[in-house]
Image (spheres, grey):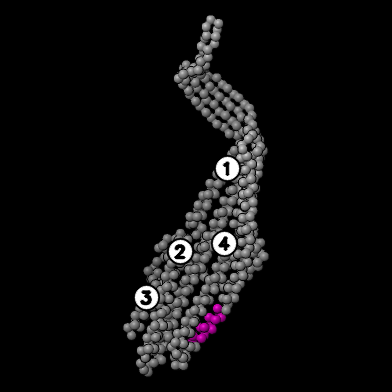
Amino acid sequence: MKKYIFLTIITLFTMSLYAQDSMTGEKITALSMNDAINRGIKNSEDIKIRKESIDKINSTYKEVRASVFPQVTGSFSWTRYLESPVLSVDMGMGSQTFKLKQDWEMSAGMTLTQVLCAFGRLFTAIEIAHKAMDLEQLMLETAENELVFGIKQAYYSILLAEETLRIAEKSHENALRNQKALKERYQGGRVSRVNNVKMEADVAVRIPMVLKAKTSLDTITIRFKEILNIEKDEKIALSDSFTEDFPDFELQALRKEMFEKEPMLMILRRRVSLQESMVKLKKVGYYPTLAGFMNYNYTGNSNDVVPSDAMYTEVVAGVMLNCTIFDYGALKHQYKQAVSDKKIAEMEYNKQKQSLEAELEATLTEYYSEIETYKANKRAQGLAQESYDITLSSFKSGSVSQSVLNDVELGLTSTKLETLSSLYKINVLIAKIEKLIVQKEAL
């Protein structure tokens, strides 16, 4: 009797864990799947880092683009000659010495330079910077796509843990129901010690199952809050459930959509294009650069600290041609490296394309196989429930043993868990397909 009371107290304590929130009046935040996705993207530090990287690459693009336009620089100098150079001239009656520089010199000026022709070097550099900017945007989309899949998987994991806990509690409730049936069966006399201990053991073995399920739910919830960057003390309740309306997918349509939208493939395609531009840039490195310049200089030299009376103006203009004549093959090898990088990028793209194609096909095959498994498990669960109800009724009348009743109930619980596991796998597989075709919201 004491054991029975002890087990009942543990049961009531376990079941009260869910009721505490409502009794204390704490605010509970309801989260749908889309709410969780939006909150996760908004709070993700990885996404914030990616957005900051986009701002940085945008500035780099503008910096490269600025090189097309005229560049103006200014300068100012004020010089004291501690020892001036002199020029000696033989005048026939002895040499005469002249100072080439007076004691003080002041100069202020501006220089304007403009690239006139670089044989496509500047525009190729701008093209590379623009492609790098697009690449960074695609990396942000990839990070969001991965995050969305992680949130969906975590969301479904909580639903799995919650339902597992309910199944464990129901199994425990059934064990107590069986124990009550045992006592009713022996109303006219005393229950044998063997039967009583066996039934108490059947009840007790369910308690660790309940506690383990509760611990698993708490652990998964902590991880879910970490993904969404939610405060640990904030109470949440999931408002969506597993979908049992399984969409019908067509492999060819999915493959086409994946090739067009999958971020990693788009990144690798953009990287191939970027490397093509790099090859072009290295190729034009052999050609000269023609630039025009104009220099304005206001300068003066005298023995006065500020040579204001000796100041004069210089204005010069011209063109410059810069060309590499000999560099021991450095440009040649830079060009070869760029060609190799382009080939590597193409191979990586083809490899990723084949890998994703195989992953999509395998996921779709597993998806339809798991649907059939779920249907079979659901039918088995209905039969197991019917079998348990009949066995319990037969046990009350004394036509089946206590062991048979316990085995049937455990079989029912096992079938429920198998059905739940199949449903969980199907929903995760749907999320995986959505990830491959970049579908953020649930289908």
Judged from this view, the residue extending furthest toward the top is 93
Q: Is residue 70 above or below residue 265?
A: above
Spot occupied by residue 136 in the image (x, y as percentages of width and height): 57, 51
The residue closer to the viewer here, 45 or 234, is: 45
The residue closer to the viewer here, 91 or 222, is: 91
> Which kind of residue does numbered mark 4 sit on?
Lys
In the picture of the structure, the residue carrying the numbered disc 1 is 62
> Which kind of residue does numbered mark 2 sit on?
Arg
Q: CA distance from mark 1 to mark 4?
A: 32 Å
The quarter of the picture where residue 20 lies is bottom left
Instruction: Give the extent of the magenta segment.
Output: 377-389
Task: From the image, state whether disc 3 or disc 2 is nearer to you.
Answer: 2
Q: CA distance from mark 3 to mark 2?
A: 25 Å
Q: Is residue 254 visible?
A: yes
Q: Find residue 113 and name its label.
A: none
What crowding class fits label 1: few (fewer than 14 Cα within 10 Å), some (14-19), or many (20 or more)?
Answer: few
Spot occupied by residue 257 in the image (x, y as percentages of width and height): 64, 61
Q: Residue at x 43, y 68 (%)?
A: 218
In the picture of the structure, the residue carrying the numbered disc 2 is 223
